[in-house]
Amino acid sequence: MADDIGNNTLTISAGAKLGRYEIRSKIGEGGMGEVYRAVDTELGREVAIKVLPPEFSRDSDRINRFRQEAQALARLNHPTILSVLDVGSHDGMLFVVEELLEGETVRDRLNAERFSVRKALDYALQIAHGLAGAHAKGIIHRDLKPENLFLTNDGRLKILDFGLAKLLQTDAEVDTKAPTMRVKTDPGKVMGTVAYMSPEQVRGQSGLVDHRSDIFAFGAVLYEMLNGKRAFSGESVADTMSAILNNDPPLLSITNSNLSPALDRIIHRCLEKHPDERFQSASDVGYSIEVLSGVSGPSTSTIAAEPIQVKSPRRVSPVLIAIGLGILVVGTAGGIFVGRRIVALPSPSYQRLTFSRGTIWNARFAPDGQTVIYSARWNGNPIDVFSARAGKTESRSHKMENTDLLAISASNEMAALRNRQYLGWYVSRGTLARMPVDSGAVRDLLEDVQEADWSPDGTKLAVVRWVNGRNQLQYPIGKVLYETTGYISHPRISPQGDLVAFMDHQVQWDNRGWVAVVDLAGKKSVLSGEWSSEEGLAWSPAGDEVWFTADKNGEADALYAVTLSGRERLVLRMTSSLRLHDISHEGRALITSFNDSTNFIGQPPGEIKQRDLSWLDRSFIADISPDGDTILFDYEGEGAGMNYAVYLRKTDGSPAIWLGDGSSPRLSPDKKWALATLFTPPQLMLLPTGAGQMRQLERGSIEQYGWGATWFPDGKQVVFPGREPNHDWRFYIQSIEGGLPRPITPEGTTGTFQGSFISPDGKMLIASDAQHQRSFYPVEGGAPQPVSHLESGDDIIGWSNDGRSLLLARIQEIPIKVYRLDPATGRKELLKEVMPADPSGIFWPNTILVTPDGKGYVASFRRMLSDLYVVGGLK
């Protein structure tokens, strides 16, 4: 290893090690240090290591501040932002570990050629999505420029050095207290950065530098991508600063007739001199570009930009363009005002079909295209099947209690799920039955079915069912086309009958996943990128696209389409979340608009009144401390990110505290740590509940984690469900002090619905096998013993404080009932009943957690209120 500190340079030879990272080669250098290709010797993956300049490591205060803020950056988990994987030091050198990318920067591409409009808008959308995700967590880039935007070889864009500009800025570089920022280093070195500074950055107005400064830089970058020239330039740094403060760049549409004036308006609004006059969020920028191009999504590899052609004898004001774009975003516009004219634009039409209060589960068009059959739970009553017609306010009940509609055939025959057992989200398991829509003649076909769809001619069924702990897609019944250890949802046969589209989910019962198709020979193809939530899918009438509803990073679920070649586009976005059910032969869509919220109520031991402990809208209770004074929950709503967010809250009603990213958190016995699971990329995290640094547990060969990681009573070990390559699910034990996980149960074992539980003496684990049998598994090995005296609907929620009895809950009933069960004797004691004030729209799963003494509790009630619409005019 060579180190020339005197010249402020540092070169590390191949084979040298920085902690667990082995250097392979140098791949670049810049103002933020040297960059090396390296291998993480523990995880066996290639990474990029950025070794910071030597002078940086001499200031202990800056090092401490850097570590704290870099750890915040590491929590950014967005597909468009370069992932910070680790921060470390070695022999006095401070370094940052990042994901390794292959490709070129936007600056490299600009030096070779100008971007096409289609490509520029594609990459602009990805930048906007990345900025929105970071800004939602309070992190600003401050140095967005072509050099910090990377184009991967597979067509994706990554934002580099997010937040590091602030971390690495030194007093030697700029004087931010001056009335106008004075550059104190070589002007040539900083020219590139200055060209993308906002006016408030140039003036040194640090109090005004916020996320809108990134939006200004975004506008400057997009301008250059489309024009090939910088928006602001000059002979010197001072000239460039003067241009930023005083000049507007020329309109692009004047010199390029292929560019829409509306695109000019978007760019120039980003480049407004005063922050209040710019777009106020990166999300708004992204939506405006989506409206202009007619497509969306960071996973889109090519975007066909179709400019809005507006002819007018008068110049269109920015205000009117903004109004027009805003109306288009919510999908209700009939036209755009241009001067004194109105240019008509296509807009969707909406016919509301339902007017009751509750949750719609599934809906399909009948063969006549006018009648709609749907299953729903209205006003707190059991699920039933109904029929409705547009223009009518009443729905007719088919008197089919506890039956869920699955599909309607071309011959008007219904496939339905009877005697259903709820599993998660919109997924249930039960008996597949077929029956004419207009009669009660029911014929049971198959057990352990989850979902089904009819072939185009109505003679065969595709089904999703559980077989030996694996989720199988069969078409026709008995022929397995695809199976997974996760779960499959929304199977739909193509109009030609040659493909089955479905949603492929990697974790039970987390509805993140991909849109995929499989042909009749069992060849599977993944069409879409990964979505953090996806529910609802149907084929377009021509069979050339699959339409689906999904979201990324906690946004409202929107309607998208993807071609069989994998090209995605946005079809419809509204302010509320959407779920697609069906598309008619004429192209009308059957969609529910829904509001999803969760309420917490709790009662600490010793208190006689319950408290409202709700926090945010889509939160899910995960743990309660034995003394009942602390709860953990995860939040999966807007802004939460792909891996959700973990919160801690005291049951005295004090505000909740954000701990970090993760799901299904469990509190350590000493209440100092929350054990949380990340799914993308897979990782177990230890999040401090007070002072301290978050930690990652060694992953070893685990390629996927499941729900239900928990602590041993000694607080020194954890147990979790996981899966290694070419192995089925099983449980592993791992020390929090280091070392690799080791399996302790046979393959095919997973957690129970509420997770997994270790006995108070640390000797037994409660888990489920492939046949859903819940058993006690000895931690040190041995034959499992089934848990006796459990009834259907009994969910295990913990151990009683006597160390022998189990705490049970019937969470699919209202009110929720909690019991204490002695599995040795079968003695069952009712401890409490918990009832929400309003049962309408209660959507499983509800959850209740009870302290070991049975006195304290916290319960969550999820409420899903939805309305069904027939939507026309979509393209």
Image: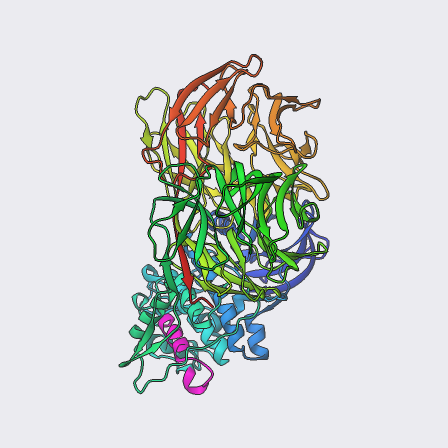
Residue segment shown in magenta: 253-271
Main secondary structure of the magenta stretch:
helix
Q: Quadrant of residue 485?
A: top right
Is residue 96 something that shows in the picture?
no
Q: Is residue 589 magenta?
A: no
Q: Quadrant of residue 499?
A: bottom right
The spot of residue 131 in percent (x, y) is 45, 60
Q: Quadrant of the N terminus?
A: bottom right
Is residue 14 something that shows in the picture?
yes
Q: Is residue 261 magenta?
A: yes
The spot of residue 539 in percent (x, y) is 55, 60
Q: Is residue 259 left or right of residue 5?
A: left
Q: Is residue 394 left or right of residue 678?
A: left
Residue sitting at 62 percent across and 34 percent down? 750
Residue sitting at 48 percent across and 65 percent down? 587
The spot of residue 253 in percent (x, y) is 42, 83
Relative to 529, is 125 above or below?
A: below
As drawn, the residue found furthest toward the top would be 825
Relative to 329, is 360 above or below?
A: above
Residue sitting at 47 percent across and 43 percent down? 660
